[in-house]
Amino acid sequence: MRIAFVGKGGVGKSSLAGTCARLLARSGERVLALDSDPMPGLAFSLGADRVDEGLPDEAVQEYDDDGRRRYRLRDGLTGPDAVERYAVRGPDGVYFLQLGKARGPRWNNARQHFGFQQVLDDLPGEGWSIVGDLPGGTRQPFMTWGRYAEMILVVVEPTPASMLTGRRLARLAAMDGGPRVAAVANKVQEPGDGERVGQRTGLPVLGVIPFDSELVMADRLGRAVLDHDPEGSTAMAVRSLVDALRVGMES
Ligand SMILES: Nc1ncnc2c1ncn2[C@@H]1O[C@H](COP(=O)(O)OP(=O)(O)O)[C@@H](O)[C@H]1O
Ligand SMILES: [Mg+2]
């Protein structure tokens, strides 16, 4: 399956994406976990040991397109090759690829960005699952950044600001006529929270993840919650989310 987590900053995209990627890998899928956020996040929730390496410059070449400078993977390097060579192997065998850290405030990431994009465009639909962690914001998911996704998961906390963001993202997605969109309610503390997220965002809710103090602790320790608390509430709830996704993808 190919999914992308979107939502406001701090709602839990990276935490859920990392956990989800590993659970899919444990069930036998070959999983590529993608961090398109130049700020660190997914490496930690995944428990990968390399934090900020992206595609190296040598993987991408510049070419001239009618006077415009463009980028593509270097001659002879296919998307699957690039994954084999440059993705970090994380726990549970997850392949982990990241855009790489911002190299200064005015860093233009066009080179990495187009390389990254081409890797995804090249990757065959069969045989790979993709779990993406997109940066907070409204543009990226529905423009080029999330175009690999068959399902966009809008992570929403049961707060007015987060639910409003979720609603906007849902509208943008509908405008685009793009992939399917569903919500995941995260940091839920009260029985009605999941339902409220559904009502306020207008999205089907595929997962309800409780507030988990062990996840907060795992983050403090810089560990993946799956390693810190393997049978805790987050692991269980994300497992249910994965099951719901499987059912959702079939229908
Ligand atoms: N279910 C949860 N329960 C408690 N805290 C959570 C939960 N999910 C995420 N968090 C906390 O919220 C913060 C932001 O999570 P993160 O995954 O980095 O969000 P994002 O990637 O959307 O910015 C972290 O401190 C994390 O520990
Ligand atoms: Mg994040």
Image (cartoon, rainbow, N blue to C red):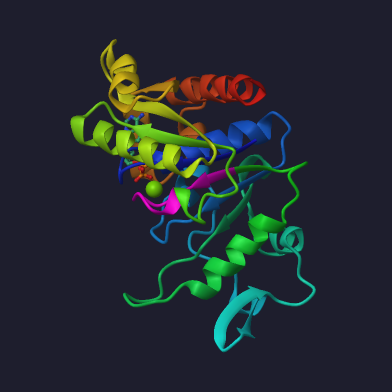
Residue 147 picture location, percent across and down: 56, 50
- Relative depth, front residue between 214 and 43: 43
Q: Residue furthest top?
A: 191
Q: Residue at x 30, y 43 (%)?
A: 10
Q: Quadrant of the N terminus?
A: top right
Instruction: Tell me: 29 left or right of 91.
Output: right
Q: Is residue 214 left or right of residue 51?
A: left
- Front position in the image: 40 or 92: 40
Residue at screen point 64% across, 20% down? 251
Residue in the image at 41% along x and 35% along y = 154
Residue ranking furthest to the right:
76
Q: Position of residue 75 (x, y in %)?
A: 76, 77
160 vs 53, nearest the viewer: 160
* Residue 196, magenta (yes or no): no
Place of residue 184 in the rendered image (x, y in percent of width and height, measured from the top left): 41, 27
Establish if 108 lies above or below 155: below
Quarter where residue 63 is shown: bottom right
Q: x%, y% of residue 161?
A: 20, 36
Residue 212: tell me if it is visible: no
Instruction: Write down the quadrant of residue 54 in the picture.
Output: bottom right
Q: Residue 136 colored magenta?
A: yes
Q: Quadrant of ligand 1?
A: top left
Q: Which residue range is magenta in the image?
A: 131-141
Q: How many marks?
A: 0
* Depicted 239 relative to depicted 217: above or below: above
Vertical arrangement, residue 93 with respect to residue 182, above or below: below
